[in-house]
């Protein structure tokens, strides 16, 4: 049995496409690496093994989630391990390249691997002279390397060149060394699709196209050419992580609100956030509500589309998990959750509230209506409904005037399309519809080919 099989617990956040890690140190203590503020899965894993978290290591100042290291220090007395170059404003052990931390038998060695961020560290876990694995954060990831434009487009090339050197440094580790990245498939920090979230140095030498780049210029061109858009909230979280997220005193509770209280909050500038399934939203919703269905990707689209400083009133369907909703919001710094509408839309309607609707259109019923595709650029380019206009969902608020009137909005399955329709409806568009399904469903229903290219 390998060390990872017996001592390492990967904790995958499917929505953000990231992995945290819990390492059983063998004496009732544990090391947590790149833990998010939502510590539920980590706590459950530690409890199953009877572990207390003694160390919390962060590979870099995360942009896509708030770190749980400060909370672990407060709750468990964990020692926070992080780069000295990050200038964090809370108590931590500041590490430079080559610094080692004795974990009580195992050793954690800091390796400076800038590129994704200036202060990025990888952490090499060793047992005496043997390299067990390396926590690579946003440096070497499965099949790629993490994006280098989060500190601004003007620094993207400079940091890509640093990333080139960092990956080559990591590639010098023994082939058998396990690679444990933070960013994986689904991450907007630029991980390619695929099921594997961990790898080895040998596997990456064979399969990672960036490691195979013949020179630095080629590496930089390929990495920068692969970068798509990323959520707007990425631009603010790294600074909050540098200062240290606020410690949470207890499990958060989402208050229940009456229809009258919701109206009062709306009058004070609150935003309605409707997290119900798309069919429920289509049938009827509060005017001005934004649809972001509660699913794994909820936090990404919340952080991309709504301001964090506006009070949010939540509309849910019966049985939806309020704790899941709240934790997804908190892990990306959304703390102004005013509450949820008690009784949902039934209570709103019973209280005389008005509502709007959006038509759901079957894939074989588009006829000659204009189609607006709101998927990411790479998705649209790969295959789309012929003639579809394209505006990424993240750009739609700023470009709502560019959207065709009376459009059928499409994405991969319908969730992003309904979010887009709600944004357009709020901006004054009418006669909107949402494709129930995606381009593949249209192609199957009509026996017509999809179009490739921009």
Image (tube, rainbow, N blue to C red):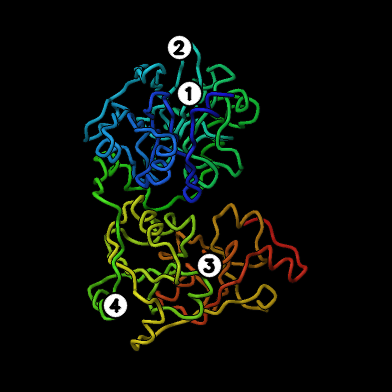
Label tally: 4
**Image position, residue 396 (x, y; %):** 45, 64
Which label's residue is closer to the chain start, 1 or 4? 1
Of the numbered discs 3 and 4, the one sitting upstream in the chain is: 4
Q: Quadrant of residue 328?
A: bottom left
- Front residue of 347/242: it is 347
Query: For the residues carrying marks 1 and 3, which lies nearer the camera in this image?
Result: 3
Pointers 1 and 4 in contact (C-beta within 8 Å):
no
Q: Secondary structure at mark 2?
A: loop
Q: Which residue is mark 4?
A: 258
Packing grade of label 1 (10 A; few <14, some 14-19, many >=20) is some
Check disc 3 and report the residue beneath it.
Answer: 417
Q: Helix, strand, or loop for circle 4?
A: loop
Label 1 and label 2: CA atoms lie apart by: 26 Å
Residue 330 percent across, percent down from the top left: 33, 53
Return the residue found at the far top: 129
- Alpha carbons under labels 2 and 3: distance apart: 53 Å
How crowded pointer 3 is (Cα within 10 Å; few <14, some 14-19, many 20+) is rated as many
Q: Residues within 10 Å of mark 2 (few under 14, many from 20)?
A: few
């Amino acid at each position: 049995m390998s060390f990872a099989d017996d001592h390492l617990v990967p904790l995958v956040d499917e929505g953000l496409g990231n992995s945290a890690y819990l390492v059983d140190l063998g004496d009732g203590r544990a090391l947590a690496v790149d833990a998010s503020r939502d510590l539920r899965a980590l706590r459950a894993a530690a409890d199953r093994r009877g572990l207390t978290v003694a160390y919390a290591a962060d590979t870099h100042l995360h942009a896509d989630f708030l770190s749980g290291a400060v909370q672990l220090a407060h709750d468990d007395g964990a020692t926070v391990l992080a780069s000295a170059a990050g200038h964090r404003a809370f108590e931590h052990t500041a590490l430079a390249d080559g610094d080692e931390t004795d974990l009580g038998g195992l050793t954690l060695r800091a390796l400076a691997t800038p590129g994704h961020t200036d202060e990025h560290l990888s952490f090499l876990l060793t047992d005496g002279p043997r390299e067990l694995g390396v926590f690579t954060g946003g440096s070497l990831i499965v099949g790629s390397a993490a994006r280098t434009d989060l500190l601004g487009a003007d620094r993207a090339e400079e940091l890509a060149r640093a990333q080139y050197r960092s990956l080559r440094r990591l590639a010098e580790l023994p082939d058998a060394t396990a690679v444990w990245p933070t960013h994986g498939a689904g991450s907007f920090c630029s991980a390619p699709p695929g099921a594997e979230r961990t790898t080895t140095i040998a596997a990456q030498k064979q399969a990672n196209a960036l490691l195979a780049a013949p020179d630095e210029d080629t590496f930089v061109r390929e990495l920068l050419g692969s970068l798509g858009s990323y959520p707007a909230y990425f631009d603010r979280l790294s600074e909050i992580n540098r200062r240290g997220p606020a410690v949470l005193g207890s499990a958060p509770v989402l208050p229940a609100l009456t229809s009258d209280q919701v109206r009062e909050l709306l009058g004070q500038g609150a935003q309605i956030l409707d997290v119900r399934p798309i069919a429920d939203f289509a049938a009827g919703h509060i005017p001005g509500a934004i649809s972001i269905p509660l699913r794994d990707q909820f936090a990404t689209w919340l952080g991309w589309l709504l301001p964090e400083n506006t009070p949010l009133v939540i509309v849910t369907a019966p049985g939806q998990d309020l704790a899941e909703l709240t934790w997804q919001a908190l892990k990306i710094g959304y703390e102004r959750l005013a509450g949820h509408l008690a009784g949902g839309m039934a209570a709103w309607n019973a209280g005389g509230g008005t509502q709007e609707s959006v038509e759901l259109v079957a894939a074989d019923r588009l006829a000659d209506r204009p189609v607006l595709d709101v998927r990411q650029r790479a998705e649209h380019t790969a295959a789309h409904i012929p003639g579809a206009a394209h505006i990424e969902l993240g750009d739609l608020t700023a470009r709502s005037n560019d959207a065709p009137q009376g459009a059928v909005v499409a994405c991969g399955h319908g969730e992003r399309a309904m979010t887009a329709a709600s944004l357009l409806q709020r901006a004054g568009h009418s006669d909107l519809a949402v494709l129930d399904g995606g381009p593949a469903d249209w192609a199957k229903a009509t026996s017509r080919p999809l179009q490739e290219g921009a």
